[in-house]
Amino acid sequence: MSRIAFVNGQYCDYSDALIHVDDRGYQFADGVYEVFTIIDSCIIDFQPHLKRLFRSLSELKIVTPIKKSAYLYHIRNIIKKNMIVTGTVYLQVTRGVAKRDFKYPKDIKSSITIIGKVISEDTFYKDIYNGINVKTTKDLRWKRCDIKSLNLLPPVLAKQHAYENNSKEAWLIDDAGFITEGSSSTAWILDKNDVLRTSSLKNNILPGITRETFLKGLCKYKIKFKETSFNIKDIRSAKEAFITSATTFVTPVNMVDNIKIGNGKPGKFAPIFLDIYKKAIKSKI
Ligand code: PMP
């Protein structure tokens, strides 16, 4: 089956999905993106992802290339045309094409690309059930990590470093020694006092949609939660650890560097938290 992409108003075969060499996304990482998870051919939490996309666009003063109401239509088309049951849809908007110059013309027309990926259900859930290892590394990112921009070189290097060290995710450490978040996920621990902890929402982390949905679900339970970051010492004494993201749901962490979390296997809260998250997903459209 051929893969179909949406590029600037046209549906086309992957081999014909070409971007201009002067696209500012390509030259300056001047753009934003979202990743939507697809389960049973439905989009998980579409509205909050769209809302975050529009916030990212607005923070960078990029004008949407299509009407807000058209996003759902095109994403659904990509799901249908690529026959995605379980998978992801990647959507990117860049400032557009202009002669290479740091400053950009006022009338520039933004570019949009939407691509889909089929993932087998087994592959999607493998790490979610078995857990992953995490490697810590320095947080080298810019000061506006709350914007989901294409400026991804530090997380690329961090994730590569993690993979080369037998780990699926990198946890980023700030100058004060605290974990900000993962290279592409939110970081959590259940600390020694049974308090679930993750960083508070400031400009140094991305406001995760999975984080938001999970926390909505969590407030119905008697689990203590504190929006406060943690360091290596806290990880050493943590009972459990997790990452959350659209593509990993709530995935348990078995090891951080050479520190075993609990007995090095997903703990008793792992399936409970996953269930809380899944039940809290209201919008499957
Ligand atoms: N932090 C970073 C840096 C990310 O790239 C992601 C993935 N988008 C997340 C957190 C988790 O966000 P979400 O739950 O919206 O996927």
Image: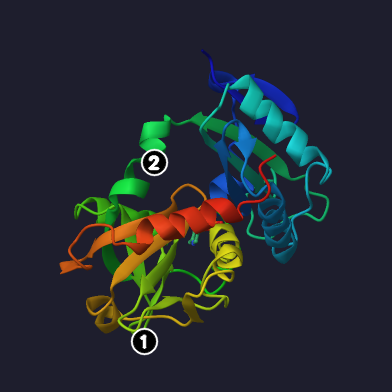
Pick the residue in front: 216 or 168. Answer: 216
Q: Is residue 96 above or below residue 195?
A: above
Mark 1 or mark 2: whose residue is earlier in sequence = 2
Residue extending farthest to the bottom is: 176
Identity of the residue drawn at 78% across and 43% down:
65
Indicate the colouring scheme: rainbow
Residue 110, quarter of the rendered image: top right
Pick the residue in front: 196 or 17. Answer: 196
Identity of the residue drawn at 65% across and 28% down:
78
Judged left or right of residue 19, residue 267 is left
Q: Pointer 2: what residue?
A: 125
Question: What's the CA distance linking mark 1 and mark 2?
Answer: 34 Å
Pick the residue in front: 55 or 154. Answer: 55
Q: Pointer 1: what residue?
A: 176
Question: Amino acid under label 2?
Answer: Tyr
Q: Provide the secondary structure element on which disc 1 rests.
A: loop
Residue 233, quarter of the rendered image: bottom left
Identity of the residue drawn at 33% across and 47% down:
129
- Circle 1 packing at 10 Å, graded few (<14), some (14-19), many (20+), is few
Residue 263, position in %: x, y?
Answer: 17, 64
